[in-house]
Image (cartoon, grey):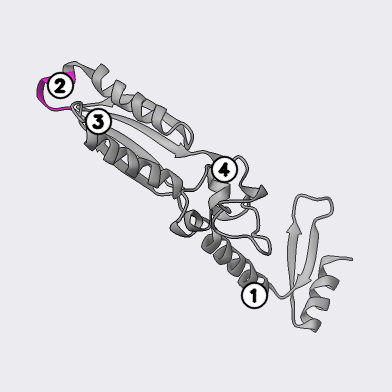
Amino acid sequence: MDTRAAMERADSLGLQLVEVNPKANPPVCKIMDYGRYKYEMAKKERDARRNQTRVEVKEVKFRPKTAGHDFDYKLRHVRRFLEDGDKVRLLVQFRGREVVHPETGRSILERVCKEVADLATVVQMPSMEGNRMNMILAPKKSRQQGRSGKAAAPAGKGDSARAPSHGPAAEGAPAAEPTPADTAAG
């Protein structure tokens, strides 16, 4: 169909002639309501933007002398952030002459990395930037799928939150402490 006839046909229908593929020989055109098409494309884009997940980068600061309870406390935060699906920037802040010994900061970052190896993968290896040493961890892919619900198993009928403490289903499970009612009956 030639261009003039196609434009007349589109006008008679109250639509527009839209070029779909200009590189084809001959160029491919389509008769459509172009305003409605643009509206639907914008709507699809908005829905896609709404459904995408945003990954935040959380930051946890350490010092070369961070040890004991403080280290464990910060490590719990790192684990929680990774379980929530966020990336974590580990930062070791050096002050004064501490910057002469970057191996202490590297050892702290390696220790954190070992502790969260089950949850995280290293995105950026430790690097010095001025008086700071940075490292970025990201949650493992299997954890992210579990969080979004794709890999999670659906709960069946009769499933309970706790495993039974006795009976054949409890084999292999740790033994529960007997209650006063159990000791009186036995």
Residue in the foreground of this view, choosing between 118 and 22: 118
Where in the figure is residue 121, as x and y percent of width and height? 48, 33
Depicted 103 relative to depicted 172: above or below: above
Which secondary structure, mark 2?
Answer: helix
The reply to whether dot 4 and dot 2 touch (C-beta < 8 Å) is no
Depicted 53 relative to depicted 17: above or below: above
* Residue under label 2: 98
Label 1, residues with CA under 10 Å away: few <14, some 14-19, many ≥20: few
First in residue order: circle 2 vs circle 1: 1
In the picture, measured across the screen, residue 143 lies left or right of residue 36, that is: left
In the picture, measured across the screen, residue 61 lies left or right of residue 79, that is: left
Q: CA distance from mark 3 to mark 4?
A: 41 Å
Which secondary structure, mark 1?
Answer: helix
Going by the numbered disc 2, the residue's amino acid type is Glu
Going by the numbered disc 1, the residue's amino acid type is Gly
First in residue order: circle 3 vs circle 2: 3
Q: Residue at x 28, y 34 (%)?
A: 91
Between label 3 and label 4, give the one nearer the viewer: 4
Between label 2 and label 1, give the one nearer the viewer: 2
Which secondary structure, mark 4?
Answer: loop
